[in-house]
Image: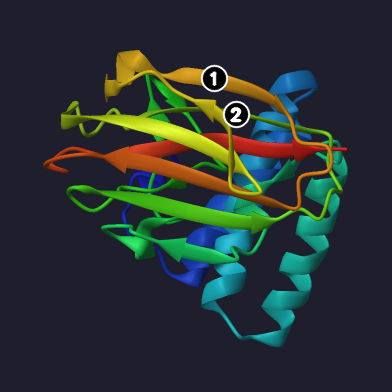
């Protein structure tokens, strides 16, 4: 499964095969390992649902997603939330499409947001004051090695700064965040690239909300 996980473009059945494999391993595990395997399965079931219109497949996927979310019920990943807007990304098609690995750690529900050169990528989400905390981390994908321009990640709440990373140029510069977002109606994730975007594989790792 590890080799198939590296495939850049998978069909609906490819995602289903991976999802089933991770699902089976999860059933044989317990504790944090079980949760991590369910997370991998959930990611691929979600992606399969976007690539297939077959009614039977959609029924299977919906049931599996429901069961997996029950295992991860205390976390609401941005991966599964629709964006209000996506702006300034060099490759918007890669938002959920890439293997995200930072410092050797895989992020099943991460978001890839490489900015345009001399620009900023922006992802906006509607919260409507329904959440208390927002957690995750940021970094550069291991596959990039190093960004030609140091990147700065920012989190805005209703347009006001909530958090800002130090300059990030390699995967070793990864940084976490743990924020209170009570009463925030709109959350915006920003990556600033004030120069050449070669290697600027900016990653939001496991960004999640909790109530």
- Of the pair 153 and 57, the residue shown nearer to us: 153
Compared to residue 48, the image places residue 142 above or below, namely above
Compared to residue 60, the image places residue 128 above or below, namely above
Rendered location of residue 143, percent (x, y):
24, 33
Q: Could one spot residue 146 in this view of the protein?
A: yes
Label 2 Cα neighbours within 10 Å, binned few <14 / some 14-19 / many ≥20: some
| Figure quadrant of the C terminus | top right
Q: Quadrant of residue 191?
A: top left
Q: How many marks?
A: 2
Spatial distance from mark 2 to mark 1, Cα to Cα?
A: 6 Å
Residue under the point 31% across and 55% down = 8
| Figure quadrant of the N terminus | top left
| Colour mapping used in the image | rainbow
Q: Could one spot residue 20 in this view of the protein?
A: no
Rendered location of residue 140, percent (x, y):
32, 29
Compared to residue 163, the image places residue 59 above or below, namely below
In the displayed image of the protein, which residue is found farthest to the top? 172
Give the numbered dot on residue 176: 1
Label 1 Cα neighbours within 10 Å, binned few <14 / some 14-19 / many ≥20: few
Q: Earlier in the sequence, mark 2 or mark 1?
A: 2
Q: Are marks 2 and 1 in contact (CB under 8 Å)?
A: yes
Residue under the point 51% across and 68% down = 13
Left or right: 81 with respect to 107? right
Compared to residue 194, the image places residue 57 above or below, namely below
Determine the secondary structure under disc 1.
strand
Rendered location of residue 117, percent (x, y):
17, 49
In the displayed image of the protein, which residue is found farthest to the front? 160
Determine the secondary structure under disc 2.
strand
Left or right: 165 with respect to 70? left
Rendered location of residue 136, percent (x, y):
60, 29
Residue under the point 68% across and 38% down = 208
Task: Tell me the residue that label 2 is attached to.
Answer: 136
């Amino acid at each position: 499964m590890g080799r198939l996980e590296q495939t850049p473009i998978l069909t609906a059945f490819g995602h289903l095969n991976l999802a089933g494999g991770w699902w089976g391993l999860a059933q044989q595990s317990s504790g944090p390992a079980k949760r991590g395997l369910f997370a991998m399965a959930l990611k691929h079931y979600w992606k399969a649902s976007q690539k297939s219109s077959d009614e039977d497949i959609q029924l299977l996927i919906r049931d599996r997603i429901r069961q997996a979310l029950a295992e991860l019920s205390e976390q609401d990943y941005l991966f599964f939330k629709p964006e209000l807007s996506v702006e300034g990304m060099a490759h918007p098609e890669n938002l959920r499409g890439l293997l995200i690995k930072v410092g050797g750690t895989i992020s099943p529900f991460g978001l890839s947001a490489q900015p345009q050169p001399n620009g900023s990528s922006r992802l906006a989400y509607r919260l409507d004051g329904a959440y208390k905390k927002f957690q995750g981390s940021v970094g550069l994908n291991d596959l990039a090695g190093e960004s030609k321009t140091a990147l700065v990640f920012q989190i805005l709440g209703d347009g006001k700064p909530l958090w800002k990373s130090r300059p990030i140029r390699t995967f070793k510069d990864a940084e976490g965040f743990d924020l209170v977002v009570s009463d925030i109606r709109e959350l915006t994730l920003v990556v600033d690239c004030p120069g050449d975007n070669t290697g600027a594989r900016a990653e939001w790792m496991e960004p999640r909300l909790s109530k």
